[in-house]
């Protein structure tokens, strides 16, 4: 993103190799079994370490879960910040954001799985992660700047709220994943098929682009 500082390292990068293994193993276990079903014994076994190291770095299972959430969000926000589409002409920049978001969600299913766990608990952990909220603000500001440019050069016929626009992009980029199994049956096609995903990605690009071309009523 223009003006985005990359000096802040990933939370996982601040830890040693053992802690990073614990975060990766725990993320997989939380995704597979949920928060309550996740097993400390299984996590430390998969991380090839002992339980004392988990307590040393994270205090307890709850602290480890928070670290997993922070890493998941940090990886997404860092990838967004390092993307090269932000300084493109406005229409191409929004197209780039849509394609990036769509592909990221397809390639990182663990992110959505962790979000489902959080939504079931009223997002009580995410609310308390200051770094997550600060980076989200930076993303919205970057979208805001693109919309300003697009309205100024008349690339866009309207200027929506940037948060609302991102919500639309995110929703269209994830519904085929969140409802993939059932909708594959309903539609009679494999929503995980690469050919379908290519078509769907460009469909979403077209929907978002068209929404910005319609004047505000």
Image (spheres, rainbow, N blue to C red):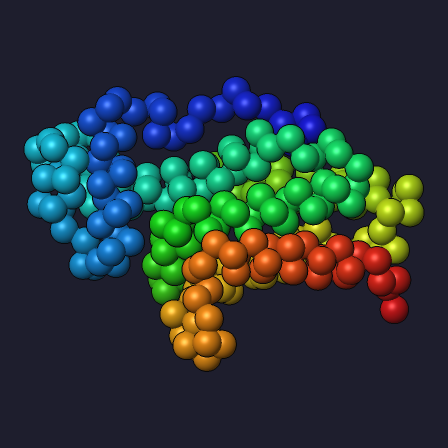
Direction top: furthest residue: 7
Residue at screen point 45% across, 59% down:
193
Residue 144 appears at what percent x and percent y?
74, 44
Along the line of sight, which residue is nearer the eye, 17 or 108?
108
Instruction: Please tell me which residue lies in front, 2 or 184.
Output: 184
Q: Can residue 118 be seen in this view?
A: no
Which residue is pictured at 62% across the width and 41% down the height? 139
Q: Residue at x 22, y 41 (%)?
A: 25
Point 36% across, 50% down: residue: 110
- Identify the image quadrant of residue 134: top right
The answer to whether 196 is drawn above or below residue 4 in the figure is below
In the picture, measured across the screen, residue 125 lies left or right of residue 173, that is left
Direction from residue 108 to residue 157 in the image, left or right: right
Query: In x, y percent, where is residue 170?
Result: 57, 56
Tell whether 92 sits left or right of 201.
right
Compared with 14, 160 (above or below) is below
């Amino acid at each position: 993103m223009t003006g985005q500082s990359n000096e802040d390292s990933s939370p996982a990068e601040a830890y040693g190799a053992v802690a990073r293994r614990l975060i990766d193993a725990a993320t997989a276990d939380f995704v597979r079994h949920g928060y309550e079903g996740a097993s400390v014994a299984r996590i430390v076994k998969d991380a090839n370490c002992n339980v004392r190291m988990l307590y040393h770095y994270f205090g307890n299972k709850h602290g480890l879960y928070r670290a997993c959430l922070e890493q998941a969000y940090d990886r997404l926000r860092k990838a967004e910040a390092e993307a090269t589409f932000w300084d493109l002409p406005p229409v191409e920049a929004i197209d780039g954001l849509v394609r990036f978001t769509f592909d990221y969600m397809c390639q990182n299913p663990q992110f959505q799985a962790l979000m489902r766990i959080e939504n079931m608990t009223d997002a009580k952990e995410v609310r308390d992660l200051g770094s997550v909220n600060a980076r989200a603000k930076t993303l919205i500001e970057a979208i805001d700047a693109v919309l300003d440019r697009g309205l100024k050069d008349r690339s866009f016929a309207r200027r929506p709220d940037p948060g609302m626009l991102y919500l639309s992009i995110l929703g269209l980029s994830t519904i085929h994943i969140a409802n993939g199994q059932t909708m594959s049956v309903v539609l009679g096609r494999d929503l995980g098929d690469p050919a379908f995903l290519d078509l769907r990605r460009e469909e979403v690009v077209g929907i978002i682009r068209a929404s910005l071309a319609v004047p505000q009523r």
